[in-house]
Image: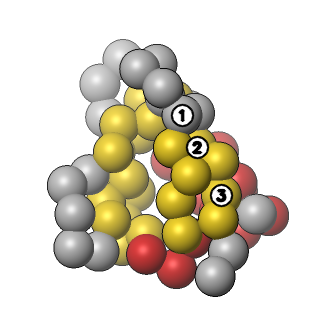
Amino acid sequence: MKFVLLESRGGNYMVVASNVAYLRVGENGQTLVGMVGSQPLLVTGTPESVAQKLLEG
């Protein structure tokens, strides 16, 4: 299992990279991260920058 740190304006998340289902543009320059079996998370950054973190993590 590979955990990746994703920053949010309300707090940070450690997510399992393989549980990410989709990335979508959110509000105010943020990204919605769809998680398998869960509600989406709103994190800082563009979908491209979040994808890069998931790939590097």
Q: Which of the two residues, 11 or 54, is positioned nearer the viewer here?
A: 11
Q: What's the distance in space between the residues labelled 1 and 3, CA to CA?
A: 10 Å
Q: Is residue 47 left or right of residue 3?
A: left
Question: Would you identify the image quadrant in which residue 27 lies?
Answer: top left
User: Residue 16 versus residue 50: which sits nearer the camera?
Assistant: 16
- Residue 43 point in image, percent of width and height: 45, 35
Q: Mark 2 and mark 3 in contact? Answer it, CB < 8 Å.
A: yes
Three-letter residue code for mark 2: Leu
Does label 1 or label 3 sit earlier along the sequence?
Answer: 3
**What residue lies at 54% left-to-right and 69% top-to-bottom?**
16
Quick check: 45 above or below 22? above
* Residue under label 2: 6
- The residue sitting at 20% across, 55% down in the picture is 39
- Residue type, label 3: Val
The quarter in which the N terminus is drawn is bottom right
Give how far across and how far down residue 57 sits, in percent: 76, 63
**Circles 2 and 1 in contact, beta carbons < 8 Å:** yes
Q: Which mark is residue 23?
A: none
User: Hey, which quadrant is residue 49 in on the image?
Assistant: top right
The image shows a total of numbered marks equal to 3
Q: Position of residue 17 (x, y in %)?
A: 57, 70
Question: Does the CB distance between marks 1 and 3 fall below 8 Å?
Answer: no
Please name the amino acid that badge 1 sits on: Asn
Secondary structure under badge 3? Answer: strand
Q: Classify mark 3: residues with Cα within 10 Å, few (<14), some (14-19) or many (20+).
A: some
Name the residue that disc number 1 marks: 12
**Distance from label 2 to label 1 (Cα)?**
6 Å
In the image, taking residue 20 as reference, residue 3 lies left or right, namely right
Q: Which residue is mark 3?
A: 4
